[in-house]
Amino acid sequence: MSDTTQYCTFWVGGLFLGIDVLKVQEVLRPQPTTRVPLSAPTIRGLLNLRGQIVTAIDLRRKLALPERGNAEPPMNVIIRTDEGPVSLDVDEIGDVVELHADDRERPPDTVRDERRELVTHVYKLADKLMLVLDTDKAVSN
Amino acid sequence: MGMDNDNLQQQLIKELLIEGFDGLERFDQQLVALEEGTADDSTLNTIFRVIHTIKGTAGCIGLQKIASVAHVGENLLSLLRDGDLSTSEALIDVLLEYSDALKEMLRTLESTGEQGEKDYTPLLDRLHHLQEPGAAPSSGTNEHAPAAKDQPQPAAETDEASWGIFADEGDAPGAKPQPADQKSADGEAWGIFAEEGSQPTQAPAVKATAKHSHSSNSAAGGEPKQPAAATGHGSVAETAIRVDVGQLDRLMNLVGELVLARNQIVQVTSNARSMDATLGQASQRLNIITTELQEAVMKTRMQPIENVWGKFPRIVRDVAHDLGKQVNLVMEGKSTELDRTIIEAIRDPLTHIIRNAIDHGIETPEVRRKAGKSETGTLILRAFHEGGLVIIEIMDDGGGINVARVKQKAVEKALITAEAAARMADRDAFDLIFLPGFSTAEKITNVSGRGVGMDVVKSNVERIGGSVDISSELGNGTTLRIKIPLTLAIIPALVVTAGGERFAIPQVSLLELVRLEGDNARRGIESLYGSPVYRLRGKLLPVAYLHRDLGLEPPAGADPDVVNIVVVQADGRQFGLVVDEVNDTEEIVVKPLSKQLRGVPCYAGATIMGDGRVALILDVLGFAHHTRIISETLDHTTAVDKETTRDAGARQTLLLFRDGEGDRMAIPLSLVARLEEFPRERIERCADHQVVQYRERIMPLVRLSELLPGWPASAHAAEQDPLRVVVHADGERCVGLVVDQIEDIVEECFTVQEEDARPGVLGSAVIHKHVTTLLDLNALFGHKAASSGATS
């Protein structure tokens, strides 16, 4: 069973996404966030993670999805990167799932560019599709 | 197991790298000292030991290539150390090249983990060649060179063995043979002497025996450390340990967090009305301990400036050499300490300034001779602490800055107009060299003069909150003065609010705060061709609205009757920032921004406030460039600035106020802690004094009429509300001087007439066209504070 990977899953604007669980440091409830004027629109702000300052990235904007509006404040999936932790803002957290490599495919060419760029694979689950997020691209500018 | 071995290997490599880089820097320094003739007895030992250590460690971990390269140099150095070879410029050149080669190998090892493929044979051949008889006339030990050639692969074990032999036989620290003795003697005979051990010439005998045993051992490189030097180092090693810099950074981060947690706790406990006494005490203790811990950890990060300067002798030598100049480098205050982040930040600017000083400043020997100076130029580096800052001066006794040529160049490069150049004073012209794209070098050398230079130096120094000043005298030299803060990790800052967000403005860029109220607030800020300006003491100050320039929405329900202007300074120019609210000054812990935000120009980092939320730290210079507030007003403000600073020596900043029967009075602003207004109902009485609760203390309030015998009581004293108070702080103690009216703050050049001087009054002067009495606040309050100190 060496071909299986565990994914931390979540929803963003109706999409079901997953990140390799080993890349996830922790998941946080909505945090007070400080805006950074003049920064890229995909950056939602800065939050204080036990004394460390973490940049929060708005995944909806990154994935060119509709704005969150004034609905529920986002959850923060804190991922590890070479330059310290970064927060990905998501709508809702799902389960950790273990998936087999046989069930995945490359995203089809018909998927819009900005989304395809951020998605490495698509898993065909019984009831829905799960997109594997490319975290390196998600945190780059 | 394999894992453990790997770890051990990694650890050893790391040690080799640390020791190697450190050592080679010392190696370069000492070589240059040797060449200059400033070397002492320990110099050759140091040089030798560096290479010996590299060879030993590299051999021990199986890095044969590095070990064998080190070995060849070691042979040469042992000849040099024993006086069998004399130094020459050619020899030093080869040895410096050799040092570079070793550094290169270590760098390759650091980045790839491999020893690298580069072939050093030509260099090694030259090293060999220098060891051969004839190449170095004083060499009398022919057998060494062949032995070295036969055995290019030293084994660490053999080394140890030969050390052992030496330790047994020759523990005389000063055992240095005279080359002459050596020549006249043959090894065997000396060996016999040594065994007999009764000859007066025992010392050289012992040494020769050691040598002899080396060559018979075929481990020619295995020279031991000098015992005296070794003990000297032992004591340092016992009291000092190597700590990973990353570890210190983590420690600093943790202390930073502790400071924040402390701030929160102190805030909570001081607000709680019915506070538990023990909690209060504990919080107070936590407060003190945290402050002490913060200082102690900061100290561990302090490094002597020597760490940057260490490589300068080599640079000076190389650059001077390339340009055919003679330069004597003098370094003063090597032990001046700075935070390591600052050390890193000033490394490149300083290197550039030094190269520049040799290239453009110091003349060639002929020119110097003609000018009646000594052929060797002097470059002085001086570092010292002054008022919480570190000052670094770089002085050369070269040609100085030719103002006419600088102006001409600036005009040619269209940096200023010919008209402006003609009007410009010398001091301003010096500053032209800091403009981007400026270079006066007649020809481009490979040292400097490519037009990237002093502007980068200036902006790099300013980025860490420092400043650069230049002064020069034609024909006599140039002095650059760099002022930098001690540390960057925790800095005092003013916290302001704009557009609903908090921002921290570093204290170093802060000049003053101006609060406009009522009519002034509505009309104070005027528009000049669409750019907002404010008349600050009669001069136009360009103004920017912080929220607007950051693209934030204006605060809801802002009071149009109040405008707060934070006057800041960047790049030597002033401008005002309009903010919604001025909160407080605080010690903030600076944290860098993540890479996603590094492109944004306006922030120097972020910090965590007492309430746990993040606030951005404003980069005043970056913001000024972003809004173009500086470049737009460049000409205008530079002119104004310079005018006011030209005769700064005689100028003083004064607070003007009125009291008594409308008399105008002045006190130096430096003696004023704050200006406050207290509503009448806050004034209380305590043992015959008027007092007010101020910043959790009791502050006595006094009037001039109480202090100056015969001074008329203020006509408005009775109905004045609120009371206008000039707060004077003397250490912990505050005294408030109640005055009728605060008039202005002025910077003035004046002459004091002392006819009416008396205790408490320095005299009078004409300031801004009015006769003004100058008060001697220290004399007035010195007495008052002492007498009221007992009551409060």
Image (spheres, grey):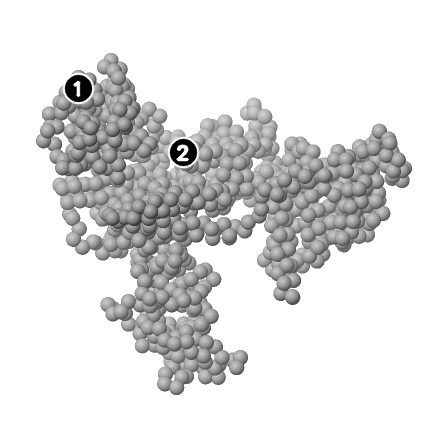
* Residue B729 spot, x, y in % from top left: 29, 31
Which quarter of the picture shows residue A24? bottom left
- Residue found farthest to the bottom: A126
* Residue B23 spot, x, y in % from top left: 63, 45
Image side of residue B340 versus residue B126, left or right: left
Residue visible at 34% across and 77% down in the picture: A15
Residue visible at 69% across and 57% down in the picture: B61
Residue B485 seen from this side: yes
Residue visible at 36% across and 36% down in the picture: B418
* Callout 2 amino acid: Gly
- Viewer-nearest residue: B525 or B151: B151
Label 1: chain? B
Please tell me the numbered disc located at residue B273. Answer: none
* Callout 1 amino acid: Trp
Question: What element does badge 1 sit on?
Answer: loop
Q: Earlier in the sequence, mark 2 or mark 1?
A: 2
Image side of residue B527 versus residue B251, left or right: left
User: Dot 1, crowdedness within 10 Å: few (<14), some or many (≥20)?
Assistant: some
Image side of residue B684 versus residue B669, left or right: left
Please tell me the numbered disc located at residue B711. Answer: 1
Location of residue B91 with respect to B687 vertically, above or below: below
Residue visible at 53% across and 42% down in the picture: B308
Label 2: chain? B
- Viewer-nearest residue: B198 or B142: B198
* Residue B426 spot, x, y in % from top left: 39, 30
- Residue found farthest to the top: B755
| Quarter of the rendering occupied by the C terminus of chain B | top left
* Residue B379 spot, x, y in % from top left: 54, 32
Mark closer to the observer (2, 1): 1
Residue B632 seen from this side: no
